[in-house]
C-alpha cells in the first residue's frame, strides 16, 4: 500500500510569484487536507477537499486555493507569494472528513519565499 | 472554537526514565483528541487517539494518554524513555460535531530531548 506522497520536496520562490504543490493520497482515501507549518509552530489547517469539493477552510486568505482530482490527488495553489508563506506544507489523506477519520500525513513540501 | 495548549515547549529526560508531555484543550463539544509525533524530515505519525471511549488510551511505542474532562487535559506519558523517542510531539483536537469540516487544531508542539 502506497502512502501519501508530496512533490516537490523543496522549492524556492520569489515574493509575488505563484506556486503549485501536489499531493497523492493513500489508496482508497477520498479526502485530502492541507496544513501549513511555520518554523517552530504546529501545523495550521488550510482547507480540505472531500470528493473533489472544498469542505472546510481555516483562516487563510483566498490566494490559497486548491483542487482535488477524480483520482483524489490534490493541488495547493498559492498566488502572490509573501515572505510569511515560507513554511512546510503538509497534506493528509483520509477515508473521510478530518476529525472523523484518521489522517495520514505526507512528508511535506518545504517552501522558501525570498 | 477549539484550541490546544501544550504546557512545555521543551522537555528533557534521561533514557530509561518516565516521560510526561502536558496538554490542555478547549472545545465547545465533546472533542476527539490525538497525539502526533514528528521526527526530523519525516511526516507526522499518529501515536494515539481518544474518541469518547475509554479515558485511558494506549498508543504505539509504549505511549499512553489519559483524558480528564474535569481538568480538560490529555497528557501523554511513557514509563521508560528510549533514545528513539527524541522528536517533536503535537497534541491535537478536533470537534466531530462540526462534521469534520474544521480540520485538526494542533498545539505548538513539545520538543522531547532524551539524554543518554
Image: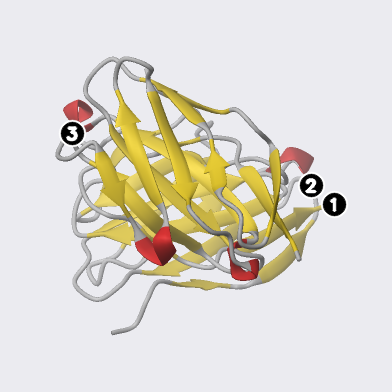
Residue at position x 34%, y 83% in the image: A2
Measuring from the top left, give residue A83's x and y in whole percent.
78, 42
Measuring from the top left, give residue A102's x and y in whole percent.
27, 54
Q: Going by the picture, which residue comes out furthest to the bottom?
A: A1
Disc 3/disc 1 C-alpha distance (Å):
38 Å
**Foreground tag (3 vs 1):** 3
**Foreground tag (3 vs 2):** 3
Secondary structure found at label 1: loop
Measuring from the top left, give residue B71's x and y in whole percent.
38, 17
Badge 2 and badge 1 both on one subunit: yes
User: Badge 3: how crowded within 10 Å, few (<14), some, or many (20+)?
Assistant: some
Residue at position x 21%, y 61% in the image: A30
Q: Is residue A24 left or right of residue B80?
A: left
- Above-or-below relation of B2 to A33: above
The quarter of the rendered structure image containing the N terminus of chain A is bottom left
Q: Which residue is mark 2?
A: A15
Q: Decide which of tag 2 and tag 1 comes sooner along the chain.
A: 2
Q: Nearer the viewer, residue B57 or B79?
A: B79
Amino acid at each position: 500500500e502506497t502512502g501519501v506522497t508530496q512533490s516537490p520536496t523543496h522549492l524556492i520562490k520569489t515574493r509575488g510569484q505563484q506556486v503549485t504543490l501536489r499531493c497523492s493520497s493513500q489508496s482508497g482515501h477520498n479526502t485530502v487536507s492541507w496544513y501549513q507549518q511555520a518554523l517552530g509552530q504546529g501545523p495550521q489547517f488550510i482547507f480540505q477537499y472531500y470528493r473533489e469539493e472544498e469542505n472546510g477552510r481555516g483562516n487563510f486568505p483566498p490566494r490559497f486555493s486548491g483542487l482535488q482530482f477524480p483520482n483524489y490527488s490534490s493541488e495547493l495553489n498559492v498566488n502572490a507569494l509573501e515572505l510569511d508563506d515560507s513554511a512546510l506544507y503538509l497534506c493528509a489523506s483520509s477515508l473521510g472528513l478530518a476529525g472523523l477519520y484518521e489522517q495520514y500525513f505526507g512528508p511535506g513540501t518545504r517552501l522558501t519565499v525570498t | 472554537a477549539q484550541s490546544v495548549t501544550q504546557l512545555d515547549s521543551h522537555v528533557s529526560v534521561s533514557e530509561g526514565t518516565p516521560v510526561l508531555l502536558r496538554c490542555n484543550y478547549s472545545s465547545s463539544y465533546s472533542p476527539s483528541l490525538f497525539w502526533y509525533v514528528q521526527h526530523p524530515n519525516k511526516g507526522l505519525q499518529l501515536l494515539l487517539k481518544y474518541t469518547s471511549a475509554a479515558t485511558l488510551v494506549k498508543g504505539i511505542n509504549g505511549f499512553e494518554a489519559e483524558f480528564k474532562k474535569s481538568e480538560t487535559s490529555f497528557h501523554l506519558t511513557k514509563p521508560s524513555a528510549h533514545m528513539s523517542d527524541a522528536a517533536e510531539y503535537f497534541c491535537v483536537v478536533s470537534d466531530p460535531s462540526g462534521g469534520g469540516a474544521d480540520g485538526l487544531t494542533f498545539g505548538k508542539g513539545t520538543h522531547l530531548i532524551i539524554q543518554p
